[in-house]
Amino acid sequence: MKKIKLIASTTMGLESIVADELKDLGYSEIKTDNGKVEFEGTYLDIAKANINLRCADRLYLKMGEFEAKIQDELFEGIKLLKSFRYKHIRSTIWTAKFYFENLISFR
């Protein structure tokens, strides 16, 4: 099956516990950051992680990554994502680490 990038969000300080839970489930390639843990899996692993991760808050599918300096670049970058065609009207795209130079942030 095709590998996809998944992100498990968690409360700050619990990242190492979520990473340990993922290691116990057999995942490798685990990357921790503030409030999130990234790992690779298949579409079947979404259900497996949702059931077995006790300290994670939510599970996200990483659709892509790009740099945007202004708000227009952010929206154009989102439109260019291959996965954007699967976005439904009621779904949410979570953007992280998008900051203007004057420290205004969008989330």
Image (cartoon, helix red, strand yellow):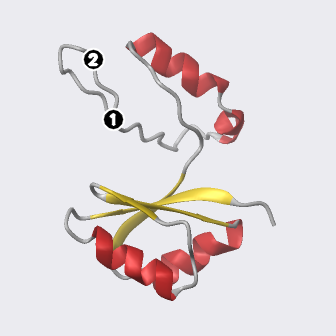
The residue that mark 1 highlights is 97
- Residue occupying image coordinates x 54% and y 85%: 25
Q: Which mark is residue 100?
A: 2
User: Label 2 crowding class (10 Å Cα cut-off): few <14, some 14-19, many 20+?
Assistant: few
On the image, which quarter does residue 12 sit in?
bottom left
For the C terminus, the quadrant is top left
Within the image, what quadrant is residue 2 found in?
bottom right
The residue lying at 30 percent from left, 28 percent from top is 106
**Picture quarter with the N terminus:** bottom right
Q: CA distance from mark 2 to mark 1?
A: 10 Å
Question: Percent x, y for residue 30?
Answer: 49, 66
Relative to 59, say whether 74 is above or below: above
Which mark, residue 41? none
Q: Residue at coordinates 59% horizontally, 56% vertically from top-left?
A: 5
Closer to the camera in the image, 99 or 33:
33
Q: Label 2, secondary structure: give it.
A: loop
Amino acid type assigned to the residue bearing label 1 in the image: Lys
Q: Residues within 10 Å of mark 1 (few under 14, many from 20)?
A: few
How many circles with numbers are drawn on the protein? 2
Looking at the picture, how far across and down is residue 7, in whole percent? 47, 58
Question: Observer-nearest residue: 63 or 67?
Answer: 67
Horizontally, is 41 left or right of 1 in the view? left
| Residue appearing at x 34%, y 28% in the figure | 98
Q: Quadrant of residue 3?
A: bottom right
Place of residue 88 in the rendered image (x, y in percent of width and height, measured from the top left): 61, 41
Tags 2 and 1 in contact by the CB under 8 Å rule? no
Q: Residue furthest right?
A: 1
Query: Which residue is the extreme one toward the bottom?
Result: 24
- Looking at the rendered structure, the kind of residue marked 2 is Phe
**Circle 1 sits in a helix, a strand or a loop, which is it?**
loop
Across and down, in percent, residue 84 comes to 65, 34
